[in-house]
Amino acid sequence: MFRDLVEKSRSIRRFAEEEAIPAATLEGLVELARFTPSAGNLQALRFRPVTDATEKEAVFQALGWAAYLKDWPGPAAGQRPAAYIVICGPVKGTAFLLCDLGIAAQTMALGAAEKGLGTCMLGSMDKKALHRVLHIPEDLEVLLVLALGKPGETVVVDTMEEGDSVQYWRDGADVHHVPKRPLAELLLP
């Protein structure tokens, strides 16, 4: 059951934008992150849900979407995320802050998948623009943006063969393919 949830939790880059996500759902995902482990139990991460149309547009404009898809500017109108959760941490965070970030973001992504939602974790962004439009305090750094919505695309995991690239790609039917290394390649002798 858990493996199915992990396999279902893919990076989605096209959504059914018109299907709104209630604020209570976003708060529930942040609640999941609240229960995750935190180095030194500092619980330093802060979360900014975004559902307002004007703010969503500003967040969208501040993001970079798919480095390997060079000719793709990101999701078109109608395929954009229905909501975002902007994850912040202290500017002078500890060495383990990024570990906390990964744990919290993945936990929220799994929680979203359980609800039939897709997510995309985005680290390519204009942080100054996000600070300005979302009124994020200056003592916090924007670390990651979690885009959310009902999936509007099919994502397939392909097992890599020797010599294959790790770059994701889209086929002629616009199916998004994500190459993953085989288990034998990950295990050390």
Image (tube, rainbow, N blue to C red):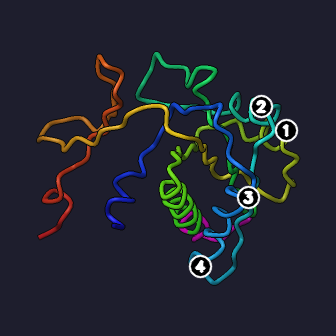
Q: Which residue is mark 1?
A: 133
Alpha-carbon neighbours of circle 2 within 10 Å: few (<14), some, or many (≥20)? some
54 over 171 or under it: above or below: below
Alpha-carbon neighbours of circle 4 within 10 Å: few (<14), some, or many (≥20)? some
Residue type highlighted by circle 1: Val
User: Is mark 3 in CB contact (under 8 Å) with mark 2?
Assistant: no
User: Is mark 1 in CB contact (under 8 Å) with mark 2?
Assistant: yes
Give the CA distance from mark 4 to mark 3. Answer: 27 Å
Give the CA distance from mark 1 to mark 2. Answer: 7 Å
Q: At x 87% / y 55%, what residue is drawn? A: 137
- Mark 1 vs mark 4: give the one in front: 1
Q: Earlier in the sequence, mark 2 or mark 4?
A: 4
| Residue 164 position within the rendered picture, expressed as x and y whole percent measured from the top left | 18, 35
User: Is mark 4 in CB contact (under 8 Å) with mark 3?
Assistant: no
96 over 114 or under it: above or below: below
Q: Which residue is mark 2?
A: 58
Give the CA distance from mark 1 to mark 3. Answer: 22 Å
- Per the image, label 1 sits on a secondary structure element best described as helix
Highlighted magenta segment, given as a residue range: 91-99
- Mark 3 vs mark 2: give the one in front: 3
Q: In the picture, residue 156 is in which quadrant?
A: top left
Q: In the picture, residue 87 is in which quadrant?
A: bottom right
- Mark 2 vs mark 4: give the one in front: 2
| Residue 110 position within the rendered picture, expressed as x and y whole percent measured from the top left | 48, 60
User: Is mark 1 in CB contact (under 8 Å) with mark 4?
Assistant: no
Q: Which residue is mark 4?
A: 39
Task: From the viewer's side, name the closer residue of 46 and 5.
Answer: 5
- The stretch drawn in magenta includes residue 98: yes
- Per the image, label 2 sits on a secondary structure element best described as helix
Residue type highlighted by circle 3: Ala
Q: In the rendered view, does 140 fall on the left or right side of 114? A: right
Alpha-carbon neighbours of circle 3 within 10 Å: few (<14), some, or many (≥20)? few
